[in-house]
Image: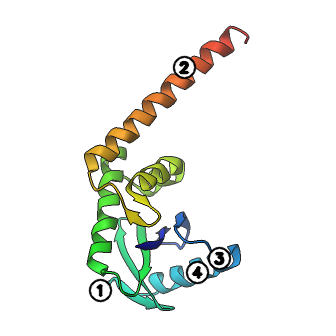
Amino acid sequence: MIETLLLVSRQGKVRLTKWFNSITKKEEQRALRDITNLILSRPSKQCNFLDWKGKKIVYKRYASLYFVAVIDDADNELLTLEKIHLYVEILDRYFGNVCELDIIFNFHKAYFILDELFVGGYLCESSKREVLRVTQAQDELMAEETKSASRRGSRGF
């Protein structure tokens, strides 16, 4: 089970956070600071797995973003790397070669895709095609709603 998923830039800016367990805001901030410092201070040639407070940190750098997962000590690190990679592949297909700016300006889509993949920290949908289909359907619904709202607005309602 993934307890926390983070996207962090090389400069240490947190771009996306998803906590699958409940902790206080203060604990979240402390964890973000600790995890970010640990990852950014590591040489690139070192292993992508870290022990941290009885948990494991699994991370992978894609372009300018680190995708970080905090998992239980008994969980499989390689499977977690695969889950991270699946998320990145779906983001790539959706945005067409995803970059940090896509995440910044379309964070709601990144969260929606994440929520389609993981429920409660567990991988629930492993099909890239299905996640993209549902995301596309949501985009179409939003476009229809925007179009009908603009028509209502032009009629003075």
Task: Say which label, 2 or 1, has the lower sequence index.
Answer: 1
Task: Say which label, 3 or 2, has the lower sequence index.
Answer: 3
Q: State how far apart marks 4 and 3 are (Cα).
A: 5 Å
In percent of width and height, residue 109 lies at 47, 47
* Residue 43 seen in the current view: no
Q: Which mark is residue 31?
A: 4
Closest to the observer: 103 or 101? 103
Q: Are marks 4 and 3 in contact (CB under 8 Å)?
A: yes
Horizontally, residue 7 falls left or right of residue 94, namely right
Q: What residue is shown with label 2?
A: 147
Q: State how far apart marks 2 and 4 are (Cα).
A: 42 Å
Secondary structure category for the residue under label 3: helix
Three-letter residue code for mark 2: Lys
The residue lying at 30 percent from left, 64 percent from top is 85
Q: Are marks 1 and 4 in contact (CB under 8 Å)?
A: no
Horizontally, residue 1 falls left or right of residue 144, namely left
Task: Say which label, 1 or 4, has the lower sequence index.
Answer: 4
Q: Are marks 3 and 1 in contact (CB under 8 Å)?
A: no
The residue lying at 49 percent from left, 27 percent from top is 143
Q: What residue is shown with label 3?
A: 29
Three-letter residue code for mark 1: Lys
**Is 148 drawn above or below residue 103 in the view shown?**
above
Callout in the foreground (1, 4): 4
Q: Which mark is residue 45?
A: 1
**Is 140 drawn above or below residue 88 in the view shown?**
above
In percent of width and height, residue 65 lies at 42, 66
Three-letter residue code for mark 3: Gln
Horizontally, residue 88 falls left or right of residue 106, namely left
* Residue 151 seen in the current view: yes
Q: Quadrant of residue 88?
A: bottom left
Three-letter residue code for mark 4: Ala
Q: State how far apart marks 3 and 1 are (Cα).
A: 28 Å
